[in-house]
Every structure is written in C-alpha cells, then in structure tokens.
Amino acid sequence: MSLRFRLIALVCGVLLISLALDGVIAYANASRSVRTEMRAAFLVGRQTVVSAIERLQNAPDPLRDLADLVASFSGNRHLRVGHAGEPPAIATPTVEKSKFGRPPEWFVRLIGVAPETEQIPVAVGNRDYGAIVIETDPNNEILEVWREFAESVVMLSVFGALTVLLIYLFIGRTLRPLNRLAGALEEVGDGHYRVRIGGRLAPELARLRDSFNRMAARLAESAAENRALNERLLTLQEEERSALARDLHDEVGPYLFAINVDAATASRLIDHGRASDASTHVQSITDAVRHMQQQVRRMLGRLRPIGLAEFGLREAIENLVAFWRRRRPNMRFEVAISAQCEDLSDIISTAICRITQEALSNVLRHANATLVTIAIERMEAPEPGRDEIRLSIADDGRGMGEPDRLGYGLVGIRERVHAIGGRLSFCSEAGKGFALVAVLPHSQQPPPPREALTEAYGS
C-alpha cells in the first residue's frame, strides 16, 4: 500500500474511532437526558393536575373545568393527558418533524426510555368524576436527540471527507518531488552521475535534494577520478610490459643466443675429442647464465619487491634501503617498523614497498639530503577491524621548489594511495626538508587472490 493511502487509512481509522467514541458519549448523555426530561415533565404535569383537582371542590361545573384542564395540555411536547370519565377527553403531544426523518427503531430501542403512566382519580364531594390519565411520550425528545446525533454524524463525515481529500491532494503534491528523486536515484544507479534535482521544495525536501545533488556531484568526481586512475594504471602496465619486453629482448635474448652457440660449439668439440677446448665455451655458458639470473632477478624486483613474499615487509624495506645505502654511503637511513605491521595484507604491503621505493628515488634524485627516516606503524581505530597503517618518509633536504606542482613520482604515489582508499599528505619547507605521510586502511579480512593483485597492480 502506498504512503498516500496509508495516511488516508490512518485518518479514516481515527475518524471512525472518534465517531464511535462520540456515539458512546452521545448515547450515555441522550439516554440520561431523555429520562430526566420525561421525569421532569411528568412531575410538572402531575402537580398541575393535582392542584387543579383541589380547585374543583368549589367549582360550579367540575366537568367543564376538567375539560379545560385536559385542553390545557394540548401542544405539550412530552405528555399525553386524558379524562377517562363521561364524556372522555384527551390531549395528545404535537408530533414534531425533522429533516433527518423519524428515528429508526434501533435508535429508539437504544435510548430505551419507556412511557410512564399514572391515573389520578377525580372526586368532588361524594361524586366520582372518573380519573385523569397522565402518560409520558418520549418520541419528541428522542427525535431531538436523533436530530443532534445525525447532525454531528453529518458534520463529522463532511469533515472527514474534506480531510481525506486534502490529504490526498497534499500528499500527492508532496510525494511528486520524491518520485523525481526516485527517478534520479535510478539514473544514478545506472551510472548517470550528471543528473540533478531542481525546483522549490519544502525545507525538509530541500535538504534532501541538496544532499542528493552533492552526492551525485561527488560520485561524478569519483567516477572521473576512477577513469583517470584506470587509464593511468593501464598506461603504467603497458609501459612496464614494454620495459620488460625490451629487457628480455636486449638483455636476455642475446645471452640465450650466445648460450645456444656456445653449447653447440662445446658439443662439437667434445665429439671431436677436444674437451679441453670445450671448457672455455662451458665457462662462457656459466657466465651468460649468471648474467641472465641477475637480469631476471632485477626484473622480478620491478614486478614485486624483493624479499616481500619470502621474508615479509621488514625485509623488503631493508632491501630497498640497502640498495640505496650501497650507492650513497654518505647518507644516513633510519628505519622504524612496528612489530604490529608484520601481518599486513598483500595489497597493503606491496603498496608500502612501492611508495617507499618511489619516495626514496625522489629523495636521492632531488632532495640533496643527508638523513632519511622511514616509519611504519599501526594506528588502532575505535571500531574493530578498521585499523590504519601510517607510513611516513621524511628527509632533511632542500624541500620542494614548487609545492603546488607535483612530479610524476608523487602523482603516482597519490594515485596508488587513493586506489586502495587511503589518504596522502605532504609537508615541505624550503631548506628544511620534505615529509610524506600515507595513511592506508587495514582490514582483518583475508587478502584477495593473486589474480586480483595482478589486475590492480600490473607493475
């Protein structure tokens, strides 16, 4: 059931309950009111008859006075008065009418007020003049109660109908923007993030509209960033694959050819009994294999940090530092890795190694620094399973010349951090060094399969 009809059903239910309560209250008041009115009319009529009979003791013509007494009750709303003597006389109540007609039998039975009758004997001197009969007639009073009840029901029905109509129209008008919002959400669900909702709305709906427009704008920005990131990742993948293909062609290919030639030559010399001459070619094969091993190890290091899979994050970072320490012996490196960072997921560990690799490369090429500090620590979050890993790399070099212009290295680091839902910040002062802080999310969930890593990090 729609919201509109739920509200209408709710209002109708309230109106029916109100009508039922009004009926119960009206019944209690009406029954008591009719009984009170009938009793008061009966007592007044009886007192009038008794007083008139007392005056008959000195009347010259009691019969005429009795006829006048009965006639005096003509037009009374609640009493039927009659003289049972000779000649008989009777005065009946006036029959009133209502625009709602006579009350139905069920209503009369519901009021439940029965007529009350009493006979008052008339005797003047020693002569019996019969009796005056007084009988209450509640029909006119019940008719009045019925009219009031019907009017209240009609008024309540009209009010209920107008209320339901206004709710129907107002809710329909109010829900129209929600229908537009639902359509806009469907478009967003289909990937159309440029949709916006306009127009004047109620304050509550206006806040909802503004929140939706902000959400759609952020989704559009995120979609654009994701497209740019995917293009960047694809470009990096192709560049890395091209570099690997070039290395295989230029470095490994010639040595494989040389090994083939040396092996064929050594085999021919051995067949001719010249084993001593073949040893030179065997040594050349050994040297070529050693060189290819170094080349393959270097390429594997580009594909995956050396030592990460075998020994963990600490060993991989130490290998990166040792690589540059051998080439820059005059530069000091300080590394602090928390013991809580040994069980990180494969994606986070690889990201930390790549960020550290690129950051150290930038320091050695641009910073002219004498000290580099690397710190990796885990920051516990209030919510379980939502810890963060903080990687900070700082140097005491000359800082960034133009802080607003990021080089390709820092752009690549930022894209890598954002790709896994992290945050990246820089701090640089001319002549006082440069600091990079990357905060990466850490989940206790099991790491994704290697296929997913390869897809996300082609390099």
Image: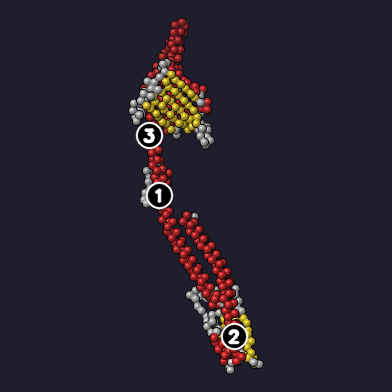
What residue lies at 62% left-to-right and 81% top-to-bottom?
A: 117
Please tell me whether mark 2 or mark 3 is closer to you in this view. 2
Circle 1 or circle 2, nearest the eye: 2
> Regarding mark 3 in the picture, which secondary structure is present there?
helix
Residue 288 in the image: above or below residue 344: above
Do tag 3 and tag 1 residues touch (Cβ < 8 Å)?
Answer: no
In this orientation, which residue lies closer to the viewer: 91 or 172? 91
Question: Where does residue 277 sit, x and y in percent of width and height?
Answer: 44, 6
The residue carrying mark 3 is 228
Residue at the image position 54 percent from the left and 87 percent from the top: 71
- For label 1, the residue is 206
Q: How far is mark 2 from mark 3, CA to CA?
A: 112 Å
Residue 455: x, y in percent? 44, 31
Q: Earlier in the sequence, mark 1 or mark 2?
A: 2
Which disc, if any, is residue 51? 2
Q: Residue at x 61, y 91 (%)?
A: 57
Q: Position of residue 419 (x, y in %)?
A: 43, 33
Please tell me whether mark 3 or mark 1 is closer to you in this view.
Answer: 1
The first of marks 3 and 1 along the sequence is 1
Are there few (<14), some (14-19), or many (20+) residues within 10 Å of tag 2? few
Q: How is the image coloured?
A: secondary structure
The answer to which of 11 and 285 lies nearer the viewer is 11
Give the Cα separation between the discs numbered 3 and 1: 33 Å
Where is the C terminus found, in terms of image quarters?
A: top left
For the residue marked with disc 1, what is the amino acid?
Ala
Residue drawn at (47%, 67%), measured in percent from left and top?
155
Under tag 1, what secondary structure? helix
